[in-house]
Image (cartoon, rainbow, N blue to C red):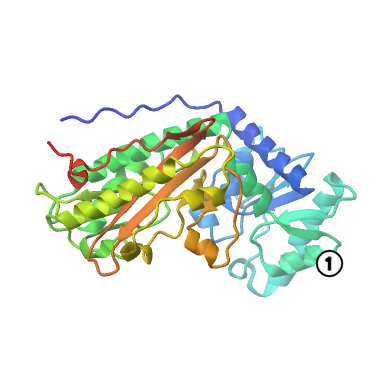
Amino acid sequence: MTAAPISVPSAPDETALRLGRLRRLRAEMARLGYAALVLTDPHNVRYATGARNMMPFLLRNPARYVFVPLEGPVVLFEFAGCEHMERDNPAIDEVRVATTVSFVARAPLLDETAKSWAGEIAQLMRSHCPGETRIGLERIDARAVGHLAEQGFTILDAQAPAERARAIKTPEEIVCSRRSMATVMEAERALEQAIRPGISENALWAEFHRHLIANGADYVETRLLSSGEKTNPWFQETGERVIRAGELVAHDTDAVGPHGYYADFSRTFLCGDGKPTPAQRTLYRLAHEQIHHNMALIHPGRTFREITEAAWTIPAPYHARRYFVMIHGIGATGEYPYMIYQADYDGGCDYDGVVEPNMTLCVESYIGHEEGSEGVKLEQQVLVAETGTLPMSTFPFDERLLGREL
């Protein structure tokens, strides 16, 4: 049977997307009392401005950052030689060459470079935030932070306003998420069709990558495709193992798709044309029950703790190998919030909050017996609506493993 085509929404208005996110970020800055932010995480730079450049490279190199005042001009510090790339960006008022504060770039000149970096940020604060001292920073060398503090500035964590802003999606962001999801689901379809006895995990994972990159995705954040005994416990990375008939193949997409939006869902497949074992069906049924029970608990106004207390109870033999969260936020990457298991609250964590409309969330399940040889990973991405959730990841579940095959 030919699979139905996946619907792809029309592209959003790019100017509305960029300016809408910048407004949300500034609203959170005002609520939390921040005069300005310096963002170095390339996902946050892209969120604030729409500017994309060498994102995986810049995850480990502080060579590009943006100054966002509560009011006034947004200044992008671009990687040297790339200043021309954002000339017409409506969310950016000025582009300068970045000062890279890292040992790799500056070695014995690092302290002098850190002073220069701090001096330029201090000058922007005095010009555009006169009389204000509270500035949020992301990852930067400790010397630069120290030199900025020495000039009388109060250093805050920039993640708080950035993550709270990103948690509630604008209408244009929801369109971007749906477009990204459509691309990633098509890539997952290509992966499923390539599953066969004798293929290696690496070769199978490459099919997923090939489709993603050919259709405008950015990159995949993890190597979470495993098979057979490598599915239990979870988090064993894709490798050279050859997949055999009758084995489970588990995959977590973790893909940064088109527009820079994460599409994150998980499916577990059965390799070959045979029937699953009773043990495989039990694992799959339990994981399927868990995500659907927990999805039904998500409603605007409900607290994270209330969801935890009403969550599906993991049977004792599977509890130790549970996934590390029940539910997590999703957007440009995995985001705020986390919703955790009751056992983890009892361990001293008191992480609470409230579900709000236009959050996008991922509902997780991993079921693997402590003494078992295989495990099942399932996950659904959902949009929080006024009355509950709407599924974003509509990729089908495995009918054989559910016991529904004709």
Residue 360 appears in view: yes
Determine which residue is flagged by label 1.
Answer: 150
State the residue lying farthest toward the right: 131
Residue at the image position 45 percent from the left and 53 percent from the top: 326
Image location of residue 273, percent across then percent down? 10, 46
Q: Closer to the camera, 102 or 24?
A: 24
Residue at the image position 45 percent from the left and 24 percent from the top: 10
Q: Closer to the camera, 266 or 100?
A: 266
Q: Closer to the camera, 392 or 145?
A: 392
Quadrant hosting residue 168:
top right
Q: In this view, does 384 lie above or below 286?
A: above
Residue at the image position 34 percent from the left and 35 percent from the top: 394
Image location of residue 352, percent across then percent down? 60, 53
Horizontally, residue 81 falls left or right of residue 383, namely: right
Mark 1 residue crowding within 10 angstroms, few (<14) / some (14–19) / many (20+): few
Image location of residue 142, percent across then percent down? 69, 69
Quarter of the image where the C terminus is located: top left
Quarter of the image where the N terminus is located: top left
Q: Is residue 234 above or below residue 389?
A: below
Mark 1: which secondary structure? helix
State the residue lying farthest toward the left: 274
Image location of residue 94, percent across then percent down? 72, 41
Residue at the image position 83 percent from the left and 59 percent from the top: 153
